[in-house]
Amino acid sequence: MAKTVDRRTFLKAATATTAAVYGVRAFPAPAADKALMAVTTPLATFPYADVQLLDGPMKRQFEENHALFLNLDDDRLLKVFRQVAGLPAPGEDMGGWYDLTGFSLTRNDFHGFIAGHTFGQYVSGLARACAVTGSEATRAKVRRLVKGYAETLDPKAKFFVDYRLPAYTYDKLSCGLIDAHEFVHDPMAMDVHEKLTRAMVAYLPEKALSRAEQRSRPHKDTSYTWDESYTLPENLFLAYQRSGKTFYRDMAKSYLEDDTYFGPLSQGNNVLPFEHAYSHVNAFSSAMQAYITLGSDMHLRAAREGFNMLETTQSFATGGWGPDEAFGEPGRGQLGDSLASTHASFETPCGAYGHFKITRYLLRVTKDAHFGDSMERVLYNTILGAWPIQADGTSFYYSDYATTGKKGWHRDKWPCCSGTFPQLAADYHISTYLRASDGVYVNLFTPSSVSWTDGGGKYGLTQQTKYPLENKVQIQVSGSQPSDYTIYVRIPGWTTSEAILSVNGKRASGPVQPGTFAAIPRTWKDGDRVELELPMPLRLEPVDANHPNLVALMRGPLVLFAVADSQPAFEKAELLRAQSANNAVGDSIATSAEGKPISMRPFMSINGESYSTYVRLKS
Ligand SMILES: [Zn+2]
């Protein structure tokens, strides 16, 4: 028989030959189930396993979260579900928000606030950590938790009878089960998900309800009349993409809060004021999934407009937003006023989780470096300064931007923020690099590596940096053969035109423009080096237009917090002359109006000391 060469073999051989001479031309296309999505985004995330964080604060947070939840007793996690199901329920109570009883608004007691509310998030965080590390112990734990939960789930999901916030907890269970399926390949997870979802219909409203609509409806539990049905579509669209079952897609559509939220936002109508902050930022991700799954441009516009309103009218210099978990009316100086009225300035792990999700979606769709800038601002000034969750559930919750603030623990154990923190720390991996059809986008600067394969070849980038405490980033290229692709490097909007990007010690020929991704197309060879040097001039950002003399000192992406027992005042020129202390915590030293040297310190280096996020300018 004559030997035939089919077209695919021929193309493979041709590619290999070309590769040897010119480099591989194709960058592997992102794997996605396109059939179930209307839109393929220009950028995609890498699989969690393809990115590894190297020694640094992001890796530390990821490992702390992974270890804590891996070691948390299964019986305790499953206890409330078993109790309601009438099954043997060994193990200690979790405590805090997680338990079945105790809640009383009149007694201001949040013990037992939302039983089992974070279970799905802990499963999700573990599943994502398993995807990163391949840990067999983590895989086994996720499978045990899904199985244990399934044993408590009856066809009517009786757990949710008279339950305070059914949509809120269902959304998190949904996410955990989707992630157990996706990242642990749990064989039961999507069946459990479907059984739960079909039962939940009885407990959910017929559509997404705004808080105002909910308040106007009679409810048995008059102590707490809000729920977050408007955040459901994101996970329902994901369930549709994973399972192909159209009832998820139809259900997702019915919970898009179009009439009172996405519709007005898409027309540039700022309806954020007085809404609950985190859940309404989280809802932007539902709008993004409506765009990706259905191709709805209105929802993309809503998310972009809404995010822009968030940044321009609700955000502090840290990137955090929503003092007292609420949005205020623009133009009234509400952010500056909040410094005198609250210590609950930004719901940090949840807010940062939602912020990472929406900026990652918008970056994938727009390739606009601005969303990377926004993500890193929140990273360095909020979540990387959060204390680790303690073994008993004691958690960091609010960042404090009050006139004089301090870090502190939340009063109640196992709050919402203990659920989002492990999810976010795993998501650091998929936020650092993104992939395009022609190359790789370096979005965050942090010690890390990314790797991919193409046509049998292995390729990768490894970053070493002390950024943002230092302003240099080194990227080492590896590759089993020369390969043609483009490395895109984010040039932050706050830097200057003096930013230097070089390859093997020679300045890159293309433009290096702040606020864009600089493109370096090249036949990359093993051992090539990319170096980035970003000038980080000091600058001031007022808290809002109504308080022009309350300013944050910024260096690159970092807010520098004034370490002092009361809010210091500065001459403007003196503050902008702050000098690096050259210490390990990244201090700058500025001289106050009273002639005192003040340490200006990044949030991630602050521990128990009092600080002012905003200082006064002497006018
Ligand atoms: Zn929270």
Image (cartoon, helix red, strand yellow):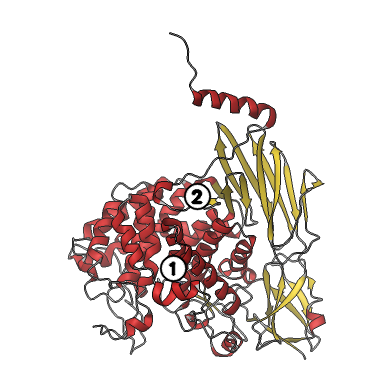
- 2 or 1: tag closer to the N-terminus: 2
The quarter of the displayed image where residue 223 is located: bottom left
Nearer to the camera, 488 or 78: 488
Nearer to the camera, 362 or 84: 362
- Residue 242: give its label: none
Do labels 2 and 1 touch, CB within 8 Å? no
Type of the residue with mark 1 = Ser
Q: Quadrant of ligand 1?
A: bottom left
Residue 504 can be seen in this image: yes
Horizontal placement of 491 versus 372: left or right?
right
Residue lying at the far top of the rendered structure: 1
Secondary structure beneath label 2: helix
Between circles 2 and 1, the one closer to the viewer is 2
In percent of the image, x 53 and y 75: which residue is there? 268
Mark 2 sits near ligand 1, with its Cβ under 8 Å away: no
Q: Which residue is mark 1?
A: 418
The image position of residue 554, as x and y in percent, is 71, 73
In percent of the image, x 52 and y 72: which residue is there? 306
Nearer to the camera, 438 or 603: 438
Q: Which residue is mark 2?
A: 48
Mark 1 packing: few (<14 Cα in 10 Å), some, or many (20+)? many
Distance from disc 2 to disc 1, alpha carbons, whole Å, reads 21 Å
Image: 503 above or below 599: above
Q: If the image is split into quadrants, where does the C terminus sit?
A: bottom right
Horizontal placement of 187 versus 259: left or right?
left
